Image (cartoon, helix red, strand yellow):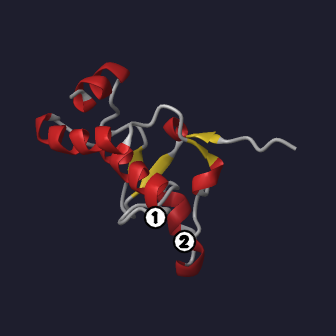
Amino acid sequence: MTTRLTPWQTLTLTDGERDVLATSARGIIALDEFRRTGTMLGHWPCDTAELAALDEVAAVDAGPSVEAIDWTGLPTADEVQRLRRHLRHLPDCLAPLSPAELADAVAD
């Protein structure tokens, strides 16, 4: 049986108050942390309404696991560090980044 992975680009995250698109700078930074550590400080891999419907214990396991996500195309950890430095030049870290904007943000 083949397990179908969820593409990272299709995820919606939440900071507990608002939804955060996976393709936004903030979403990419949070997902990089999730991919590397299995956790996202201050974010959950589900939308705000889903999180609100969960009790505190269930919220810990909200959304897909690291293993259930297709990480193809997510910037590398080094590229995410460059994205963090580039953030001060982005007008809105919650807006989705186009492929060209992402390439520019993570370029050396």
Label 2: state its secondary structure.
helix
Residue 27 disc label: none
Q: Quadrant of the C terminus?
A: top left
The quarter of the displayed image where residue 61 is located? bottom right
Amino acid at the residue labelled 1: Thr
Q: Nearer the viewer, residue 16 or 98?
A: 98
Q: Nearer the viewer, residue 54 or 57?
A: 57
Amino acid at the residue labelled 2: Ala
For label 2, the residue is: 59
Q: Disc 2 or disc 1, which is closer to the eye?
A: 1
Left or right: residue 80 compared with residue 72: left
Label 1: state its secondary structure.
loop
Residue at horizontal 50 percent and vertical 62 percent from the top: 38
Q: Is residue 24 above or below residue 14?
A: above
Residue 19's spot in the image, x, y percent?
41, 51
Left or right: residue 97 compared with residue 6: left
Residue 47's spot in the image, x, y percent?
50, 54
Q: Is residue 7 above or below residue 45?
A: above
Residue at horizontal 55 percent and vertical 60 percent from the top: 50
Residue at horizontal 12 percent and vertical 35 percent from the top: 89
The quarter of the displayed image where residue 60 is located? bottom right
Residue 48's spot in the image, x, y percent?
46, 58
Q: Is residue 91 above or below residue 49?
A: above
Q: Quadrant of the N terminus?
A: top right
- Disc nearer the start of the sequence (2/1): 1
**Mark 2 burial class by Cα count in 10 Å: few <14, some 14-19, many 20+:** some
The quarter of the displayed image where residue 70 is located? top right
For label 1, the residue is: 39
Inter-mark Cα distance, 2 to 1? 12 Å
